[in-house]
Amino acid sequence: MSHLIPYWKRYQKLIAIGLFFLVLESFGDLLQPMVVSMIIDRGVMEGALDVVFRLGGLMLLITVFGASCAAMRCVMASKVSQQFGADLRLDMFAKINRFSFAALGRRETAGLITRMTNDTSQLMSFTNSMMRVFMRSPILLFGAITMTFLLNPRLAMILLVIVPLIAILMYISMRVGFPLFTKMQEALDRNNAVLREYLSGVRVVKAYNTFDQEIGRFDVSNTDLANTSIKAMRVIGVFFPVISFAVNIAVVATLWLARGWVADSQMNVGQVVAFLNYVMQITMSLRMIFNVYQMFIRAKASANRVSDIMAEEDAEVDGRDAAGRNAIDGSHDVADWNAIEDRRGSVGGNATDNSRSAAEESAIDNSQGAAEGNTAENSRCVAYRNAMHSYAETPKNKPAVAFTGVTFSYPENTGEQPGRQPTSPSKDAAGTARQPSNPVTESEPVLRDVSFSLPSDEIMGIIGPTGAGKTSLVQLIPAFYLPQQGSVQVNGVSTEYANINALRASIAYVSQQNTLFYGTIADNIRMGKANATVEEVQAAAKAAMAHEFIEACPEGYDTIVSQKGVNLSGGQKQRLGIARALVRKAQILILDDCVSAVDVETEAAILQAIGNLDPSPTIVMITQRISSVMNLRHILVMDAGKAAGYGSHDYLMENCRVYQEIYHSQLI
């Protein structure tokens, strides 16, 4: 649970206040049996009603005081637990958002959801119980034991046998129960995964009438969850009665010994009553501790699963962290880095001024001068300084996208660090050897030695048979993944050294499966540019040929899109996805077979509108229709992960067999 300690430290003051009231409440509870003892021995036994009323009033005040402290303690506990849960969920969400695509691919969506909901709720409940019960129980336990020794040391010896026995039983219960509760959470993950898969594919299930099969699948996972839960609860069912039995033995032994001592006047009746009250407090404390330990077993299993997320190191890393700071061994101060970041931060806006301020030049010069005296270190600084240039300011003579000997394979589900992990020492941009770290096991390459160069403001069509590696290729451009060999450069900057935010700010990506979110149509389009005006939204929709059907909707651009856009057709969703990309006004536009659900006439109109954009972006377009790329000067033909050809239609018709086969199969 080490990852959770910083969260609890955030609320040290609230926890301290809660503990203060808890201690006062506990002292009040410990005083009550003594007051009862005095009422019986000094008031009832001697017939002194004034003593009874006086001590009864005192006991009432102690009760009211304890209840007030308990209320304050509960308020503090609830506040801490709720804020703790909110912070943990937010940080987990942010952490998952930083996961690389490889890390997301290794984890089931249902498991991530369970961690953010069920596991977080378990930890919240444990935090609340820890402040309300667990911290109070030890005070009552040791306080009550102390009071029993003050009342009658001989009678209190019974507790020296019973309390250690109960502690041993609780320890065994925790050791046996923890693995079972961990398995129960894993079974809940599997059950949620089946349910989520069914809900996401319910149309397919109904279309193929496979409801019985789905019931069978869910029954298997649900039964497994039930059986695992029964095994975990069986531990509680066995140990709890045993602990209660041990406590009852202590009560019986107390009454047996006390009756003789009372008869011999060695002990007063009030003392016996007080002693039994303290025994009951000890019993309740042990039961509360046992209940909290049950929660601790579940919370520990949940904490391990949450820590597994928070400790994930496979996150997307900016080039600054991956190359720059390592290259110069942290020799920059904060001002240098902030100035350089400010320089690069102009990418996402409408910056067109190519001039540099004196402060910026100084910061960049510092990044080089910090490594003087060491040629290799200085070279790395120069390479990184070049990578720090804004994408918007790349010279026109540099290609917008360039692949050089790129080989890429998806990391297998090994839980290791994906990305560029060569099996032998490779070299960085400055030619300095670097050793691989966190090696991973890759699957078979989906791209093999792919090379091409696309000039700025040009359109490149990518065509090829299914499974040729087209989508895998374009996913390397925004650095969703890094190649194992070769380099991918965007506007002259290697994606290995690029700042992720700056790189993706210069790219608009439309995937094959357009994901729409619950909200209005305008809100979905504005995901491409949060501050887009109404005019910009409408202009993007018109270019994507979506304006007409949007206007035909009951609420126009304010029409609510259902989750995943189920109230829209496939073609409508694709056009909204294109509009979302166009409103971004990015330098590079990637279209991953995103017009497959529209007719040829609409596709041609969309592509013509995109081609007439001002300023014109560099376009990388995947398509299955050869008619969409025939008029382009840059056509990349992919086949079995390799570049089978690159050039114009006429060139490929003469020199590329794969392109010829596609042409003849579609047009002849």
Image (cartoon, rainbow, N blue to C red):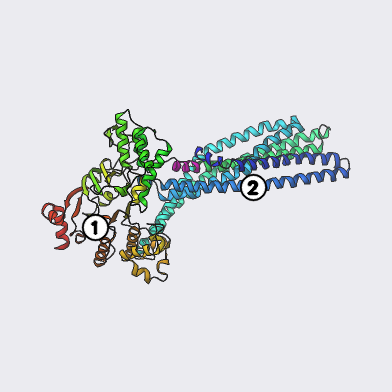
What mark, if any, has residue 473 been given in the picture?
Answer: none
Q: State the residue lying farthest toward the front.
A: 358
The amino acid on which the numbered mark 2 sits, given as a three-letter code, is: Cys
Q: Considering only vertical position in the picture, is 211 above or below 430?
A: below
The amino acid on which the numbered mark 1 sits, given as a three-letter code, is: Thr
Side (left or right) of 313 relative to 18: left
Instruction: Find residue 615 and report its horizontal and vertical position in percent.
Output: 29, 57
Q: Considering only vertical position in the picture, is 566 above or below 113?
A: below
Can residue 635 be seen? yes
**What residue is pinned by disc 1?**
623
Chain-order first, disc 1 or disc 2: 2
Q: Which secondary structure class fits the magenta region best?
A: helix
> Which quarter shows the C terminus?
bottom left
Q: Which residue: 67% across, 47% down? A: 72
Side (left or right) of 76 relative to 265: left
Q: Which residues are magenta?
A: 302-315
Q: Is residue 262 magenta?
A: no
Instruction: Find residue 582 and report its horizontal and vertical position in percent.
Output: 33, 59
Instruction: Find residue 86 and report its horizontal and vertical position in percent.
Output: 52, 49
Q: Considering only vertical position in the picture, is 205 above or below 118?
A: below
Q: Nearer the viewer, residue 577 or 506?
A: 506
**What residue is pinned by disc 2?**
74
Q: State the residue lying farthest toward the top.
A: 373
Q: Nearer the viewer, residue 415 or 89?
A: 89
Can residue 100 be seen? no
